[in-house]
Structures are given as C-alpha cells and as structure tokens.
C-alpha cells in the first residue's frame, strides 16, 4: 500500500528541494524528475523524441514497481504542461498505478513567479543534483521558453483530486513547505 506524492510546478519552483525536505520527515523516498532525464541524457538528448520516450518509459516502469512494492511511499517530482494532453494522461496513469495496488495518491502544486524561479535556477542544491541544469544560460533560456509556450499551473477548479494542495512557495522555505504537505495529508 505505497503512497505516491506527486510534487508538480514549473521549472525551478523548488520541487526537488521540497521533496528532499519531505523525505527527511517521512519514510518516503524521493524520485525527482532529473533522475531519469540525466540518466537518459547519457544516450539521447531529452530534447529528442527518443530521449523523451525513454524518460517516459523509465518513469512508468519505476513508478509501477514502487506501486507494487512494500515501501511506505514515493515522492515524485514532475513538470506538468497543462496544455499538453499527454502530461495530463500521465498523471492519471501514475495515480491509477498506486490506487490499483491499494495505495494512495497525493497531488501537490508549487507556484512561484518567474523572477523567483530565475534566482532559484542557480542554487547550489539544484546544480549539484541536476547536471543538465549546470549550463545556466541554456537552463534560463528553457525557463523563459516554458513560461511563454506552456501553462505549468492549473486553473482554479481544474484539479479534481481528493488529495490536492496548491502552495505558493515564493516566501516559504522548502522545510516549511514540506511540513505543510505532511500535515495536510497526515503522512
């Protein structure tokens, strides 16, 4: 009966850092999105069709394995493009994996304005754990591109999950944000 906490939000909002803090105060393990992206980048660029498909396959296989395992829970970080049907389908697939195995699904949305995320994009923690982000100019360009081309925030009422929370973490530390999540979901 593993639990899945999916932490979503735009690039550099703090998903991994909040996940690291949540991992410290729960028995859950962190599976952040760059664990697959950086692995695949050794073979195929994530910007290619092959790279995106391999990342998708790895995530699905790993989350399915976790859903059937004896672990208490997994914290998974994910950038959702609400304007892309595949991203919304993936969320439903991940949710179903856990619920079909008597697990639970929790959906967290983190929000912060672009100027805050531009600053966070160069944090030591981000650069340590995400090799693909070490090219700061390219990474910053990706932030601006995503802001212009995609909607990474849900609209009011768009998310219908029972276990859902939206947090503006602009002025809240990752530690405080993790505590809010833990208390909200009683985990």
Image: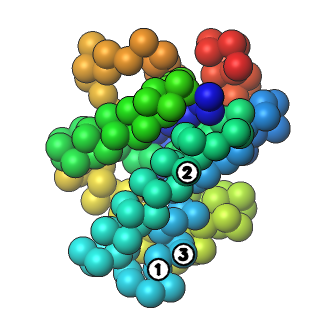
In which quarter of the view is residue 93 placed? top left
Quarter of the figure with the C terminus: top right
**Please, is residue 159 above or below residue 101 in the view?**
above
Q: CA distance from mark 3 to mark 1?
A: 6 Å
**Pair 2/1: label in front:** 2
The residue nearer to you, when weighing 172 against 162, is 162
Is residue 17 left or right of 40 when viewed as pictured?
A: right
Residue 164 percent coordinates (x, y): 46, 18
Q: Which mark is residue 76?
A: none
Q: Residues within 10 Å of mark 3 (few under 14, many from 20)?
A: some
Q: Which mark is residue 39?
A: 3
Q: Residues within 10 Å of mark 2 (few under 14, many from 20)?
A: few
**Which residue does the numbered mark 1 point to in the structure image?**
41
**Please, is residue 108 above or below residue 85 in the view?**
above
Whichever of labels 2 and 3 marks the residue nearer the N terminus, that label is 3
Whichever of labels 2 and 1 marks the residue nearer the N terminus, that label is 1
Point 56% across, 34% down: residue: 4
Residue 20 percent coordinates (x, y): 72, 44
């Amino acid at each position: 009966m593993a639990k899945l906490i999916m932490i979503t939000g735009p690039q550099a909002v703090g998903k991994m850092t909040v996940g690291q803090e949540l991992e410290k105060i729960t028995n859950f393990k962190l599976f952040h999105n760059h664990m697959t992206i950086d692995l695949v980048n050794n073979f195929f660029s994530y910007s290619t069709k092959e790279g995106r498909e391999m990342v998708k396959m790895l995530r699905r296989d790993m989350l399915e394995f976790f859903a059937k395992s004896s672990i208490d829970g997994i914290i998974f970080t994910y950038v959702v493009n609400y304007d892309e049907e595949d991203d919304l389908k993936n969320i439903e697939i991940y949710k179903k994996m856990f619920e079909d195995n008597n697990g639970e699904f929790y959906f967290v949305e983190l929000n912060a304005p672009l100027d805050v995320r531009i600053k966070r994009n160069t944090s030591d923690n981000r650069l340590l754990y995400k090799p693909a982000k070490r090219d700061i100019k390219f990474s910053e360009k990706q932030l601006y591109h995503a802001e212009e081309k995609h909607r990474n925030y849900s609209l009011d009422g768009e998310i219908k999950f029972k276990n859902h929370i939206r947090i503006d973490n602009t002025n809240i530390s990752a530690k405080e944000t993790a505590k809010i999540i833990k208390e909200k979901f009683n985990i």
